[in-house]
Amino acid sequence: MILNKTSRGVTRLDLLCLAGFLVLTVVATWPVATDTTGVMFGFPGDTFDHVWMNWWYAHAWDHHIDWEHTPLIDAPVGKDFSQLAMQPTWRWSVIALTKIDGEIFTFNFLVLASFFLSGLTMYFLARHVGAARGAAFIAGAAFMLCPYHVWHSYQHLTLAAVQWIPLYLLALFRLRERPTVPRAVACGLVFAVVMLENYWYGGFMVLLTALFVIVSLIWKARQREGLALREVLCAMIALVVGAAAVTPWVGPIAQRSLEGKEPLWPAMPVYQRAPEDAAALAASPLDYVRPPSNHPLWGKAFAEPRFAQEKTIYVGIVILALAFVGLAASARRGGGTLFAAIFFAMLIFVAFNLSLAPFAVVGNSIAPMFRAYARLAVLAEAALCVLAAMGLSAIAAKTRWGNAALACAFALVVLDFAYVPAQSVTDVSKTPAVYKWLAEQEGDFIITEIPTSRFTNYDRFFQRIHHKRVLSNDRLDQVADLQNLAELQQSRELFGGGDEEGLFRRFTARLAGYGVKYVIVHQRDPFPYNPVLQSFVDKRWDVTLQWTPAQIEQWSKETGALREVKRFDDDAVVYEVAAEPLKILIGAPDGRTLVIGGAEASGNAGELTLDILLQPAPVPEAEAAIVFESEAQIEEFPGLTRDGSKYTLSIPLDNIETLVPLRIKNFIRIAPLPPLKIKIISFTVSGTGALQARE
């Protein structure tokens, strides 16, 4: 046992600490608690995607729609959530909470809950390992306010849910101390909550549990204690309960990850993350001791790391110092307190080392689905907070000014983790006029936006308002444009310029191929303040971030590719797509194919261009075979054969994008030529060789 019997049970002082966490939550997220639908904690990005998901879950439930398939985003194909790693507990809680006051309220409620509950669960964990109430409260406050939690709250709703980690640790300690069936079942169920809330944290709990078992067995061996049958049986019960609860959701994801079969649409990898990503999103030793850039006093003195939302993991100098004191104090006390201190010290050592780049690359080769190993810092932070509570308890017990020491420690922790809450929220109370106008337009059509909103996700955020289908700009068209943009950048460096207008023509032709009706060109960023995205978005590698509204207006007039429909002086210009469409075909080397817009295609003036996109790409020796019909005779070229009105095209796919122009054979040189119309009968892709990742 770690605690004595007199310290068990919830007392008035515990309730006072609970009230303290509630006050801290309100202050740390101010003014969210007073305006839960007009502001959001955090900044545009994944937060807006979370809000859209909140809306979609509730909308699908209320209208009896299959939530796993939506036509509203990633048009024209739609989004297939059944192929992605979706968190079930998030969906369940959202469906209930959204009915209270909408999707923005739901987002804010879950963020506020993560603050309050993370402090509360850390408090009870620290109390369980012997910390005094005041020290445990400070540990809870530190875990609540630590930069890891705050910065993930800015972007990642499920990663902000750190509150279940201390609760699972508490369940493990209780099961070890007195193995009973109820405690075993509770331990398995808490593990399931962690896993189903966030698969990253679920994986971390597997690692944590393995370490806990190893340390426990070594401890027993050194104490010359045997392993009781009750302990083994209760451990098996916890394992079975946890596995049974998570397998229906984790099993299919694990199978898809082992197969490495990425969704054909969209293009962003889900199960096969690149080693370069793992290295870039790993932690460095400096990240653990570098204060966050939003600290009001000395934040500007430290350079913000790239991918700040992932690598802002400062553990706190005060907490670190107190943790060393806790280790020393527990060594003198011995017993269960020493076991807890040894375990948490080992957890810090393991989490710290596994979060660094060398292991991240190795880990990516074993489990390529995972990439952001800096997230292991949450385990180190939790362990440090517990050890700090032990150390602070020892300090307070050895001095006559114990309460003053606690007050001083609390003030230092708050100062160490300080940020300005009012600068950590986004005002979402106003809807730009362009989205209100879209909502008034009749019909079912597709829109897209420039600059690309692939990082801010404001296209999805406002889709809740206008309900039109959205082609998000992180689709495969952007992958192809990245290649073209790289060529353009090289041309600029070598020759001082490039075919900017040509890239614009291809971009708009691809939009037409996707069936986009309107393009919204923003005159200004609807949400200009975003310290998170500013840490990693590189405008050089996003074509639409380089184009100014004036350039788009000029090229639209010169090419006729976009036709102005309506201008909003304070926000945006709406253009209608008038470009000649490409016929887009998407294929994967495993044989999956996708023909955008149906089998039929037509082009004016006797010409039509097939745009074949390979995903993932490139793949050595990949080849496409297309069989189509055309009443008009088509000019022959290598790889094209004809049998009456049926044509077979075989073409190597040695790049991300392959453009194939088809032209009517002009025997007598007439002009203009009639439209070229074809009907695609089959489209197959085959490929051999190892898949290679490309940035």
Image: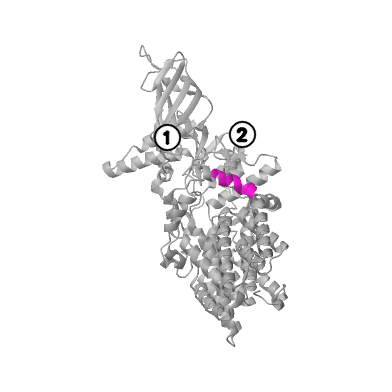
Q: Position of residue 332 (x, y in %)?
A: 55, 81
User: Which structural element holds mark 1?
Assistant: loop
Q: Nearer the viewer, mark 1 or mark 2?
A: 1
Residue at the top extreme, as displayed: 668
Residue at the bottom extreme, as displayed: 400
Query: If you read the primary sequence from the N terminus, does the residue marked by circle 1 or circle 2 appear first?
Result: 2
Q: Residues within 10 Å of mark 1 (few under 14, many from 20)?
A: few
Closer to the camera, 475 or 337? 337
Q: Any mark on residue 450, and which? A: none
Closer to the camera, 528 or 626? 626
Q: Position of residue 564 (x, y in %)?
A: 48, 35
Q: What range is drawn magenta here?
A: 247-256
Q: Residue at x 36, y 42 (%)?
A: 486
171 lies left or right of 268: right
Q: Position of residue 347 (x, y in %)?
A: 53, 66
Q: Residue at x 52, y 73 (%)?
A: 319
Instruction: Inspect the image, locate mark 2, and give the three-letter code of the amino acid beneath it.
Output: Glu
Instruction: Inspect the image, locate mark 1, and give the three-letter code of the amino acid beneath it.
Output: Thr
490 lies left or right of 477: left
Q: Any mark on residue 442, and which? A: 2
Work out which quarter of the rendered image holds the C terminus and state it. Answer: top left
Instruction: Tell me if residue 89 is in the magenta stretch.
Output: no
Q: Position of residue 540 (x, y in %)?
A: 38, 47
Q: Any mark on residue 688, and which? A: 1
Identify the main secondary structure in magenta.
Answer: helix
**Residue 213 in the image: above or below residue 322:** above
